[in-house]
Amino acid sequence: MDGTTIENRIKESIQKNKGRILNVYFTAGYPKLDDTVQVIESLAREGVDLIELGIPYSDPLADGPTIQKSGEQSLKNGMTLETLFSQVKQARVTTDTPIILMGYFNQMLQYGPEKFLSSAADSGVDGFIIPDMPMYVYEEEYYTLFQKYNLSISFLVSPMTSEKRIKKAADLSSAFVYVVSQSSITGKSGEISPQQISYFEKIRNILGDHPSLIGFGIHDKSTYDLACTYADGAIIGSAFIRALNEEGDIPTLVHNFIKKIR
Amino acid sequence: MIESKVSYHPDQRGYYGNFGGAFIPEMLYANVEHLRKCYLEISHSTSFQEEFNSLLKDYVGRPSPLYHAKNLSKKYGATIYLKREDLNHTGAHKINNTIGQILLAQRIGKKRIIAETGAGQHGVATATVCALMGIECIVYMGEIDIERQAPNVARMKMLGAQVRPATSGSKTLKDATNEAIRDWINHAEDTHYIIGSAIGPHPYPDMVTRFQSIISEEIKSQLKEKTGSELPDYVVACVGGGSNAAGAFYHFLEDESVKLVLAEAAGKGIDSGHSAATSILGSEGIIHGCKTLLMQTEDGQIVEPYSLSAGLDYPGIGPLHAHLIKSGRATVYAATDDEAMHSVLEISKMEGIIPALESAHALSVLSQMNLREEDTVVMCLSGRGDKDLDTFVNYLEKKENG
């Protein structure tokens, strides 16, 4: 199976800036329900390469306290999938930056897989990250649906992932391989250790030319630069959500944050 | 019509029919896959079996009695036996599983144990085996459950465990389980997660079921001794996640003449908005790593359940149970808080046994089952009621004050 045949905005954006890709994550409907569009537009204006939009979830197993709390707040704000899709549609009027939805598999199942993917594609979403969808389930049940709607998918690899499985993740990932920097949930903010560096080198050797981004624990310029040394770029989530919490208007907060990163 | 035989055991990928599997983030894959590959071989090995059986006998106090409850039998017009899991060391069936899993954890070289707990029975059972084996133990427990199950929190601490409050979401069992899973992601290399119910990613539901299956193994031989037949007409058990039910049913699954009955917690009533009757209110989805029936919104947000009983207010149900229900092998009834409290008092006064609030739900559904005089019913009395004394006292006071 060749997972790299999806020709969409994500692929273009990765090719354009391979080596320095900045993918910024935030939770849809946070801090306020209607902030989604403005945050997307601000990120696009600052020139980020990919925007990862988190679908708030009641039980986000892979997420640390920062993303958990933003999700809780967003749900309290009244966020639903219908609202999220309409916000993406609205943002698409002004921005062309690729948008990736990150959510949990139960959300896709309960909404109805085809309806979920078609609504996403229709609103202008380009791809997905669904950390608890097993690779075989994607391959056997959903691969053709993702193709049908021209949506990319990215699978995760972690320090405990075997070489065989890393190759499998690369085969199936039609956007990029999501390299989880350490065995942890999101939001850890320490320095990158020598063990992590050798893990990144191992992954790069196995992946060859296949695009990859490092995420989990990337929180400032130095960790972003380091990620760019060992992969095609980085994903920043919790640190950005913390920045959105500070005093000030959204465009300024976003501008100041991105300026500090690159 | 040709009927194909329904299997009640998981396939290679951990599915019971449509339910089960392993839906986990990649960071847990290596651990769960390793468990999947080795749990049967290790737990079937002679050295494991010898140590497991000897601890169940001399440490837990098994076999637990199968008691003919004559007064309840008279009242409900059938022959009722109580499987006395409440008489186990630590006061519930939970220890059967924790003994099995701690022996497994030792054999795969894990140095640190985590667990989730609702009522605290599984937490105590985990803290107990960790004390016995000298292994570090961390138990996640919802902040609300810490309040309503204070005696069990004290017991866990005495046994040397660290009790960490889960402060997210509904602050009960579901959230304690999320926190335990997050801890496992953060400590995947040295830690074994002892799940207390027949839930979670494959192989957990099967592993827990097998360690609990001692319950039905004993029921069979004890019933044979008492009645001449090893098969009752009914086996009844309460279900939250479903470990005592899984254990009480296991050796009867293929005996289709034995009717399997699950008692769910209806809380304040199934349609009250404060319920934990998962099989009725739930739909297919994924919770804590397995596909099963769970209570959720149209958007797939998991709904916070309610039951007065901390061991039953779980929004999901084990995948084996979902399969038993959907295939028609098991029947579900629900009992409200009030009905369960009534049963607590009834068992206490009629048989001199104070049951756990969870276990009392099983008695509450007998009156819905249209029992006949010739029926033999085995009810799993999964735990004792000491831990619930505060809840009982508060409830009775409220009733008295109107």
Image (tube, coloured by chain):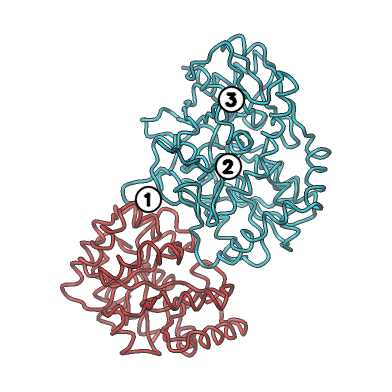
Mark 3 — on which chain does it sit? B
Q: Which residue is mark 1?
A: B301
Tell me the residue that label 2 is attached to.
B118
Residue at horizontal 49%, vertical 79%? A167
**Whole-percent x and y of residue A90?**
18, 67
Instruction: Determine which of the numbered discs, if any, sits on residue B143 in the image.
Output: none
Q: Chain of mark 1?
A: B
Helix or strand or loop: what does disc 3 sit on?
Answer: helix
Q: Amino acid at mark 2?
A: Gly
Q: Residue B243 or A48: which is nearer the viewer?
A: B243
Measured in 3D between alpha carbons, the distance from the residue under mark 3 to the one under mark 1, in whole angstroms, is 32 Å
Residue pushed farthest left? A93
Residue B131: x, y in percent? 78, 50
> In the picture provided, is B386 more to the left or to the right than A249?
right
In the image, which lettered chain appears red? A
Look at the numbered discs 1 and 2 and tell me whether their residues touch, using CB distance below 8 Å.
no
Tally the numbered discs. 3
- Asked which secondary structure carries label 2, the reply is loop
In the image, which lettered chain appears cyan?
B
Question: At label 3, which amino acid type do we have?
Answer: Phe
Eye-nearest disc, 3 or 1: 1
